[in-house]
Amino acid sequence: MTYQNYSLAQLQHIDAAHHLHPFTDHRDLRDAGARMITRAEGPFIYDSEGNEILDGMAGLWCVNVGYGRNELAEAAYRQMKELPYYNSFFRCSTPTPVLLSQRLAEIAPANVNQVFYGSSGSESNDTALRLVRHFWALQGKPQKNRIISRKTAYHGSTIAGASLGGMQGMHDQLYGAVPNIVHVMQPYAYELALPGESDHDFGLRAAKAVEDAILEAGAENVAAFIGEPVMGAGGVRIPPASYWPEIQRICRKHDVLLMLDEVITGYGRTGEWFAAQTFGLEPDTMTTAKALTSGYQPLSALLVGDRIAATLVEKGGEFYHGYTYSGHPVACAVALANLDIIEKEGLVERVKTDTGPYFAKALQERIAGHPLVGEVRSIGLMGAIEIVSDKATKARFEPAGDAAVVVRDHAIANGMMLRATGDTMIMSPPLIWTRATIDMACERILKALDLAHADLTKKAA
Ligand code: PXG
């Protein structure tokens, strides 16, 4: 490809003429012109104008081993030459998904040993939804099909993903959601805890909302609860320690399956291979994608617990579900090479014992005191900064969401890629970040906060 022969203005013009972007106000994009990212190396991305930007989002929560990994390019090249594609339908298989499945069973919680592949988190959540409902039908309980999810959850953008998710704007554009999915409160203490309520008590109250929904529907009608161990796109909302053990207890008590969406938290993000291990959970399904290949290839893996798998194998007959690219050999080869890197470089352990704690301390000691910052929080290498106009009252700037965009734009202009969601800045850096990278990020974030503070107070005056 010879994009170098095109100027930025030309590429932006063609982009506007022919390319509809995801989650984008197209009028707004056409007015502004897209930033063109053209290459990347290690923790940095570079745009067409030569700007170097530290990637605080690991692409979109996925490039856990960083950019420019020859091992991954070579794994794809070798596999493409040997066997670029063959399917796993009709009693066929290919070696890379076979070996990847074994590897995933090794690193997953003990009760999780089977894998169903897709190409995206959304697809695998669709698989998960179909699988849990089919499980109960095979158990002779087809009416046990209601799913409990949470407001502001993100489970993808297909009709099933958006229906499972709890994003109001997405529901407004569904024009007919998948039926029998209900959404309860999210464990977001910063905004939802009552005055004087401890984190512990708030966590139990948020879990009780799930039990209330089960009792309201009747447990005999409830198939599963689905949740991201830590809400990602919703704003890195980290539940209190009391939340997940209570959710697990409630699910077991009412024989409701536990579906974890680990699309963001999987593959080392929270300092264990999976957040299920961080929180001590035994899920019935675990949706994973993104960092499975560090984003070098599109691939998702729905990890399936023994209870569902045994029923599917023994009572199932044919499960009428699957994708052309389920178990794509090239994507699976890249995933295997990616897991090799994570393991060889000890990245999961490093997040747990070194960079994760250092990141938490840096946010607390250097960022939390800034006048625009209401709270900082992190787990492993995912973190959030709440932007407020008044630290004491937690008041936000008007209109909602604009202040975080001001911070984000200053951050990018100063070489730091951050994401703004509502009034929350979120971060999910590659796991290759070192203490020095964290220091560099903090300096750039502080500078962006100072510049944004000047803008926002000038505007308010
Ligand atoms: N579940 C979770 C928890 C996710 O974060 C998906 C499912 C869907 O995955 P696919 O591969 O179908 O996109 C995701 C995706 C954001 C952002 O703005 C987050 C995601 C996707 C796009 C944007 O933070 N997460």
Image (cartoon, rainbow, N blue to C red):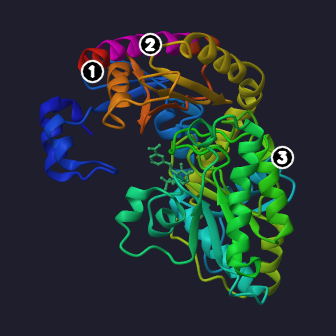
Reading the image, the residue beneath label 3 is 280
Rendered view: 166 above or below 257: above
Q: Residues within 10 Å of mark 1 (few under 14, many from 20)?
A: few
What amino acid type is highlighted by mark number 1? Ala
- Give how far across and how far down residue 102 sits, in percent: 78, 55
Dots 1, 3 in contact, CB < 8 A:
no
Q: Residue at image x 34%, y 65%?
A: 173
Reading the image, the residue beneath label 2 is 444
What amino acid type is highlighted by mark number 2? Arg
Which circle's residue, 3 or 2, is located before the other in the chain? 3
What amino acid type is highlighted by mark number 3? Gly
Distance from label 1 to label 3 (Cα)?
Answer: 46 Å
Q: Is residue 456 rendered magenta in the image?
A: no
**What number is the disc on residue 460?**
1
Which circle's residue, 1 or 3, is located before the other in the chain? 3
| Magenta highlight range | 439-454
Rendered view: 29 above or below 119: above
